Every structure is written in structure tokens, then in C-alpha cells.
Image (cartoon, rainbow, N blue to C red):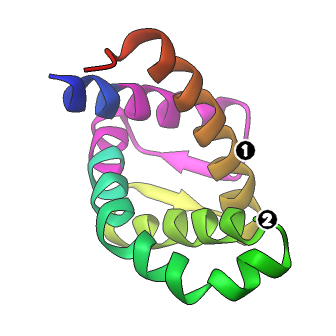
Amino acid sequence: MNLIIRLLITAVVAYTIPYVLPGIHFDGFSTAVVFAIVLAILNLIVKPVLSILGLPLTIITFGLFALVINAVIILLAEKFVSGMHVDGFWWAFIFSIALSLSTSLLNGIFASKD
């Protein structure tokens, strides 16, 4: 149940952020739900690999390279989700920061700690 709540929170946040960021586009809420599922899968499979490969850069930049990895994951998710469009790397970068902050806040409020 906790996973479903987290996915729905991610979908709602991802669907509402484009109202503030004009460089991100979703065709509908169902596209945002598919995006949340694809993002969860990419975070589970691809992100650890990218994090290990980028570890030297992450250490050199004091962790800031992790933000670049998050943006790359957003761009990868865009390739798998039809109905979602990101206008460029910088929009993906800003979107990943906004999505991370918002979902962290809302998951802390609504998702159980179990």
C-alpha cells in the first residue's frame, strides 16, 4: 500500500509541476502515472549503475553530480513514456530538483514509515 501511495504522490507532483515549469509536458494524468512507474523502475535498476560509474565525479563535486544523474534519469524516462516531453537537459535538471523536493515533503506527510 505504501508503494502505491508513493507512486500516486509522484504522479500528482509530476502532473502539477508543468504548470510552473513550461519546459515539461504531460498529455494527461494517466501519462504521469506511467511516468511515476517508469521512474521507479529506472531508479531501481539504472540509477545505482550510474551512481557507481559517476562516483568519482560525485566525490569531486561534493555530491552535486548526483543532480545530473537525476536529470539523466528523467530524460531516460521521457524516452520510455509516450505523452511526456522535456524541452532539454536544463528543464530535466530543474524538474528533477522540484520533483525530488516535492515528493520528499509529501511522502514525509502522507506515506507511512512502515
Label 1 vs label 2, nearer the camera: 2
Based on the displayed image, in which of its 4 quarters is residue 78 positioned?
bottom left
**Residue shown at 55%/48% (left/top)?**
25
Which class describes the residues within 10 Å of circle 2: few (<14), some (14-19), or many (20+)?
A: few
Residue 82 in sight here: no
In this view, the residue in front, 4 or 54, is: 54
* Residue 64 badge: 2
In the rendered view, does 51 fall on the left or right side of 34?
Answer: right
User: Residue 59's spot in the image, x, y percent?
Assistant: 76, 77
Q: Of all residues shown, which one is farthest toward the right?
A: 61
Identify the image quadrant of the C terminus.
top left
Provide the residue designation for mark 1: 22
> What's under tag 1, amino acid-wise?
Pro
What range of the chain is rendered magenta?
9-35
Using the numbered discs, state the Cα–Cα distance from disc 1 to disc 2 in whole angstroms. 24 Å
Is any part of residue 42 visible from this angle? yes
**Residue at 27%, 37% in the rendered image:** 30
Q: What main secondary structure does the magenta stretch of the protein show?
A: helix
Across and down, in percent, residue 111 comes to 35, 17
Q: Tell me whether circle 1 and circle 2 mark residues in contact (CB < 8 Å).
A: no
Query: Which tag, 1 or 2, sits closer to the chain's start?
Result: 1
User: Helix, strand, or loop for circle 1?
Assistant: loop
